Amino acid sequence: MLPDYEKMGVFYLGKADDGGPFLYDARHLLTHGVVIGMTGSGKTGLSIGLLEEAAIDGIPAIVIDPKGDLSNLLLTFPQLRAEDFAPWVPEGKDPAEEAATWQKGLAEWDQDGARIQRLRDAAEVSLYTPGSSSGISVSIVKSLDVPDAAVLDDPEALRERVVAVASSLLGLVGVDADPVKSREHVLLTSILHGHWSKGKSLDLETLIQRVQDPKVAKIGVLDLETFFPLKERFELAAMFNNLLASPSFAAWLEGEALDVSAFLRTKAGKPRISIFSIAHLGDAERMFFVTLLLHQMVGWMRSQSGTTSLRALLYMDEIFGYFPPVANPPSKAPLLTLLKQARAFGLGVLLATQNPVDLDYKGLSNTGTWFIGRLQTDRDKARVVEGLAGAAGGQPVDRPALERLLSGLEKRQFLVHDVHEPRGPLLLRTRFTLSYLRGPLTREHIRALRPKVAAPPVVETAVEPDQGAAGTASPLPVLPKEIVQVFLDPRTATLVPYLLGAATVSVADAKVGLDVTREVVFAAPFRSGPVPVVWDEAVWIDTKLGELSGEPPEGAEALVDALPDAAQKAKTYATWAKDFAGWLVKNQGVSRLKSKSTGLVSEAGEDEAAFRARLSQAAREERDAALDALKAKYAPKFDALRDKIRDEGLAAQEARAAADHAA
């Protein structure tokens, strides 16, 4: 039998001031939250407890961990044996004593190993180490890819992404650039915006080339050479080239792509807590990665449907430097966007800091829940009270009372200011965490954990035909004008002949509401022998037919291998086109998944993980709607009981006062 606190949609965070369980409605995080507390206040324990509760409730989370403390979420030992703790216990401590301490601590909070197992079964925890191979590596190769349509269709969102990426890139090479005054920044934003607005992706190599030759005559009203001479552009390009050539930068080019959907769910749809440990990075690298990840979160958010239920969490530990009150680092704009807009899409944002002074409280004015622990100085307390007053939405705030409460807080005790709580600020004593809190993990610890961590599914990507296959070079043939020739952008001057098939594929089924149309481009290699083309050997090309050039690339003089005779006859192409159409019918259908319990059917292009996530969200919304209806039904009775208790309390006070007066 589950404990009374184990309820769907409710987080068990500890005990209230009256000794009962402190239960926090998960949906309150839709208006976001902030955790503030000095070192030793219990801030990390509370944050880990919140993430544990989210995981048990089936809510995935992306965790940005600048200090390395949140990696402790991987240290969960259901059997609570000393040998399980031994590899992770800090030097000088006894594993048996640590195991006993955790077993006793959990029992005091009505928890046990079974709840730890429930946590492990509910969600997968993955540890990523950007710029390092200690944990799961993260590749930024696709970070310069053209953003999703949701961003491209929003001029403000596209502008924010362009400015942030340009600032982050310049920060990597040590250029502290002002977005308005810096030539370097203006040039990069011009390049990025020019490519992305045309639907074209970039990589670092192309970016370096475009810095030297932007393919534009003017920047603003000034001609390019006046605005930014070639010699100085070359110096900037050389800085990026040195970065790309650096052995230490190689770790950024390998690993999993920045795919938010894959970070939130496994391929089977299981919730995931993805922790991005960045403690090993320098300041510029941290800012670069955090900014990229936050913008990926914004893009993912805008691709989701609206909801009134919590879909996912974004947690960032130690926000110091990323969300300051005056300065505007690249990370600030996407954070502000998330705080303003994420609620409508079911994304909760939870921020934490031990430095309450360097925090943009104006940006946090709409934050619904404040968890405030022990603070170091009177200045810190005054700053937090000021922030609470700003978040009160015009409601009166008893500042002296708040300051007295803050001054009396003990370790692991927090003042909880929740705008959804009619009783006002409450006191919380945090529970024992299910995870073993040993402090930041070393690189050796992270390497030891890596085999146990499942990486996100590999995303299938388009294949570009081989540009340098071995063979005998032949001159470029002169083909009949009826045969259309197009060219990919090769890396060498020798070309490989392929048969290109392009089509618009439509699939419709009124019974399941299916109506999908998409453009496809495939390239099949020519073979020797009686059958020169087999469409089963074709590779998908990630481009549109209209984007391919009809002119051979400069310097292209020869083909690798001769073109088959059949490929030089126009009438052959009609037969190949017919074969291609038949192959598409057999191979380009749309598979659909269906839930027997709900009757919901997956949408075109929706994989199993996304479909299961949608089913989970639909169930959560249905549950929340039923809970709201139940609350609305019994609210009058609760209000009447509350009024009765208040009236009887007042009557009792008056009776005591009368009795005292009579005496």
Image: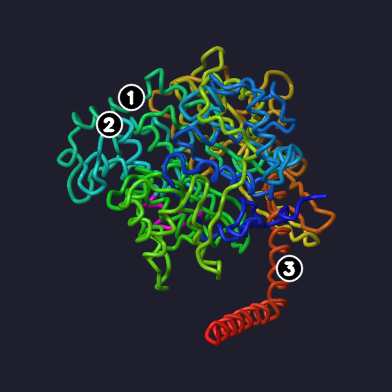
The residue under the point 17% across, 47% down is 222
Residue 500 occupies quadrant: top right
Q: Nearer the viewer, mark 1 or mark 2?
A: 2
Counting other residues with Cα less than 10 Å from the Cα at mark 1, is it few (<14), some (14-19), or many (20 or more)? some
The mark that comes first in sequence, 3 or 1, is 1
Q: Name the residue under label 1.
A: 241
499 vs 587, left or right, is left
Mark 3 highlights which residue? 626
**Front position in the image: 212 or 609:** 609
- Separation of residues labelled 1 and 2 (CA atoms): 13 Å
Front residue of this view, candidates 327 and 663? 663
Find numbered disc 1 in the image and state the secondary structure of the residue it sits on. Answer: helix
Q: In this view, does 446 lie to the left or right of 582?
A: left
Residue 174 lies in what quarter of the image? top left
Q: Please report the bounds of the magenta region as a residue range.
A: 150-160
Q: Quick check: marks 3 and 1 in contact, CB under 8 Å?
A: no
- The residue under label 2 is 174
Report if residue 460 is visible in the image.
no
Q: Looking at this view, is 213 or 349 the one in front?
A: 349
The residue carrying pointer 3 sits among few (fewer than 14), some (14 to 19) or many (20 or more) residues within 10 Å by Cα, namely few
Q: How many marks?
A: 3
Whole-percent x, y for residue 401 in the image = 41, 64
Colour pattern = rainbow
Q: Residue at x 56, y 40 (%)?
A: 259
Residue type at mark 3 is Ala
Residue 290 appears in which quarter of the rendering? Answer: top left
Question: Percent position (x, y) of residue 292?
Answer: 44, 41
Lateral position of residue 427 relative to residue 118, left or right:
left
